[in-house]
Amino acid sequence: MVNQQVILVVDDEPVILDSLSDILSIHGFQVLKSSNGLEALETLRDQIPDLILADIMMPEMNGYQLYNRIRQNPEWVWIPFIFLTAKGEAEDIRFGKELGADDYLMKPIDAEDLIAAILGKLRRYIQLDQERSSPTEQSGHGIPAPSNVSDFPVDLTPREVEVLRHMVMGLNNTEIAEVLFIETSTVKTHVSNILLKLGVSNRVKAVRFAIEHHL
């Protein structure tokens, strides 16, 4: 497997907790499981994960409270955090983003979208870590210099490269459309073309291909 990162999954519903763990394990991640926020804090004291997936509505300590506790600890503050929730109301999503969470996924969660989001967040953290440790390799405005597209083994159009890079960052089609100021249907067309050119069957494989070839 490509990935060996550790993911902490926090959810009070055993079926969902086991289902998410199975998906992550299949994709090569090591999984830590907690049934509520307090249990997650205990887990963090024993082992620091590379990313946290946490439900919002939980007993003992909810996801928002867990997030705030984690962000107060200098040893944990850097950990990418994705909220999981059955709620789809705009104010809940907005509140989670205002707190500073890296993403917000609604249940039922599509496995491909979940893995793509995780890979994007982990890659972004690696970029930021490299930026901090190797400032001389940055481009002019504090952003890691992009890789040379000419070295990429597949001939993509400039727009397809943009779409693929945003896929790697974990954005969905709607978010990519908003960033690039194009229609969602246009993004879907670009994604289909990208999958065809890369010779892969889904977004997760496309993201992995891009990461492995340093796009």
Image: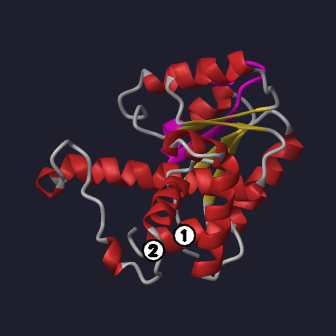
Apparent side of residue 94 relative to residue 145 in the rendered image (left or right):
right
- x%, y% of residue 77? 41, 31
- Specify few, some or many for label 1: CA neighbours under 10 Å numbering under 14, 14-19, or 20 or more: some
Label 1 vs label 2: CA separation? 6 Å
Q: Which image quarter holds the N terminus? A: bottom right
Discs 1, 2 touching: Cβ within 8 Å:
yes
Which SS class for mark 2? helix
At label 1, which amino acid type do we have? Arg
Apparent side of residue 61 relative to residue 212 in the rendered image (left or right):
right
| Quarter residue 14 falls in | top right
Q: Is residue 61 magenta?
A: yes
Q: Residue at x 48, y 70 (%)?
A: 210
- x%, y% of residue 204? 64, 65
Is 149 drawn above or below residue 127 in the view shown?
A: below
Q: Residue at x 77, y 23 (%)?
A: 57
Judging depth in this view, the residue of 151 and 5 nearest the camera is 151
Examine the rendering and report whether any part of residue 155 can be seen: yes
Q: Is residue 57 magenta?
A: yes
Which residue position holds label 1? 208
At label 2, which amino acid type do we have? Glu
Examine the rendering and report whether any part of residue 61 can be seen: no
Is 9 drawn above or below residue 130 in the view shown?
A: above
Which residue position holds label 2? 212
Q: Which image quarter holds the C terminus? A: bottom left
Range of residues picked out in magenta: 44-63
Which SS class for mark 1? helix
Residue 162's label in the rendered image is none
Judging depth in this view, the residue of 69 and 160 nearest the camera is 160
Q: Residue at x 51, y 65 (%)?
A: 160
| Quarter residue 71 falls in | top left
- x%, y% of residue 109? 78, 46
Judging depth in this view, the residue of 2 and 103 nearest the camera is 103
